[in-house]
Amino acid sequence: MKKDWIKQVSILLITTGSWLIPYAQSVSRLHEKAIVVDTHNDCLTELTLDGKDISGHLSTGHSDLYRWKKGGLDVQFFSVWTDKTPRRPAGFFHDALEEIDSLHRIILRNPDRMTFADTYRQVKKRSHQGKLVSLIGVEGGHMIEEDLGKLDSLYTLGMRYLTLTWNNSTSWASSAMDETNYPERIKHKGLNDFGKQVVQRLNELGVMVDLSHVGEQTFYDAIAVTTKPVILSHSSVWSICPVFRNVKDDQIRAVAKNGGVICINFYSGFISKEYDQLQKRLFERKDSLQGGLLAQGLPQSNRNQIMSAFDQTYDSLMNAARPSLSQLVDHIDYIVKLVGDKYVGIGSDYDGVGSVPVGLEDVTTYPKITEELLRRGYSKKSIKRILGGNVLRVMKANF
Ligand SMILES: [Zn+2]
């Protein structure tokens, strides 16, 4: 009898060896083993414009090489971005070249900590070298300046996804911002013939078609044209937080059917409906306060004083309204429950957003997502898919 009991326990220990490992250790082991991919980080813009140096340990912003290491991130897509008006007369394409140049220079300055990649095989191989594998995503079709030759040039320089639009529509694709809020700005709703050629060219070259930021019409037009799996590099779930930048259930189903991946954006206003609604109410109040002060004819200095007090209150209210880490993981959960665990990933938008959930303050915090998924009973296989495996599959299908 006693022998039987010992045998039972021995079998239990052998078959469930992980019981012997403390929980925190099993989180860190799993996180370390997984190839962790973030498909969207905006730090390149500050690096280009303000000379910010991510080599050191920075006290501001979300990202630097020291903190990426701590967060166990293996692969980072750096977003190449410029606003809806170009920085210099040379134009949007030139702005993109400047940002790409910044990335290459930072990699050259940190050869022991960063490495560039533009093929799936390189990503797989180099993600085990202990360096941050760095790829380029171009955020906004305006940077090709309606010229497939410029698209080809960006590909040659390493672009591995192109977000068809940013908030601004192009002549060939309408954005989510314009389709939702400013339809009068749209010249052609969805993709026109040139827009379809862009998608085809991206497919031919092996550049992922990124459908974050695009309007629903553009989304469905692109899904109909593409022959390869698409990516949404930084978008969350509309059913949980109904804002223009998030994707609806039918869109999530369409991405799953296409074999693509939706990478969850960390922005508080895309995660929490309450955060978004409070922000809208406070913006309205700010507008009416400003109008009222002007109507009263108060001197500028008094107006400034009142407005700065308002801004302080705004900051503290918005800070208190930040969603939790668990609310972010709810977005992952939602997609998994709707279509399975093969179509969701992480696209933080770090250094591109002003507010992130409590607990996800910077790039050191990715392991907390692993921990929360484990706590919710996700299998290791499933967690590895979500942390990066799904994006790697879409990369492989494209380049
Ligand atoms: Zn964006």
Image: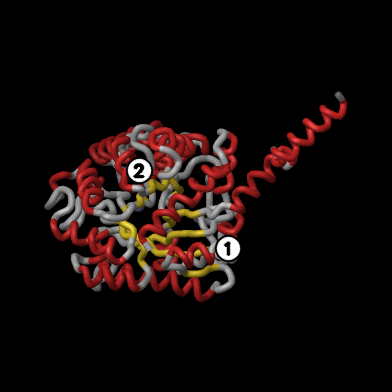
Evaluate if marks 1 and 2 touch, with contact meaning CB atoms under 8 Å apart.
Answer: no
Q: Residue furthest top?
A: 1
Q: How far across and how far down the image is residue 308, in percent? A: 40, 44
User: What amino acid does circle 1 point to?
Assistant: His
> In the rendered image, is residue 322 in sight?
no
Q: Residue furthest right?
A: 2
Q: How far across and how far down the image is residue 249, in percent? A: 32, 35
> In the rendered image, is residue 272 in sight?
yes
Relative depth, front residue between 285 and 379? 379
Real-space Cα distance between discs 1 and 2? Answer: 29 Å
Q: How far across and how far down the image is residue 149, in percent? A: 22, 72
- The quadrant of the picture occupied by the N terminus is top right
Relative depth, front residue between 25 and 253? 253
In the rendered view, does 179 fall on the left or right side of 15? left
The local crowd at label 1, few if under 14, some if 14 to 19, many if 20 or more residues have their Cα within 10 Å, is: few
Q: Which mark is residue 169?
A: none
The local crowd at label 2, few if under 14, some if 14 to 19, many if 20 or more residues have their Cα within 10 Å, is: many
- The quadrant of the picture occupied by the C terminus is bottom left
Q: Is mark 2 within 8 Å of ligand 1?
A: no
In the rendered view, does 355 fall on the left or right side of 225? right
Relative depth, front residue between 318 and 26? 26
Mark 2 secondary-structure assignment: helix
Q: In the displayed structure, would residue 12 be above or below residue 190?
A: above
Quadrant in the rendering for residue 243: top left
Question: Residue at position x 33%, y 40% from top?
Answer: 252
Q: In the displayed structure, would residue 318 be above or below residue 161?
A: above
Question: Residue at position x 52%, y 38% from top?
Answer: 325
Quadrant in the rendering for residue 41: bottom left
Q: Which residue is mark 1?
A: 128
Q: Which residue is mark 2?
A: 256
User: What amino acid does circle 2 point to?
Assistant: Ala
Question: Residue at position x 44%, y 66% from top?
Answer: 47
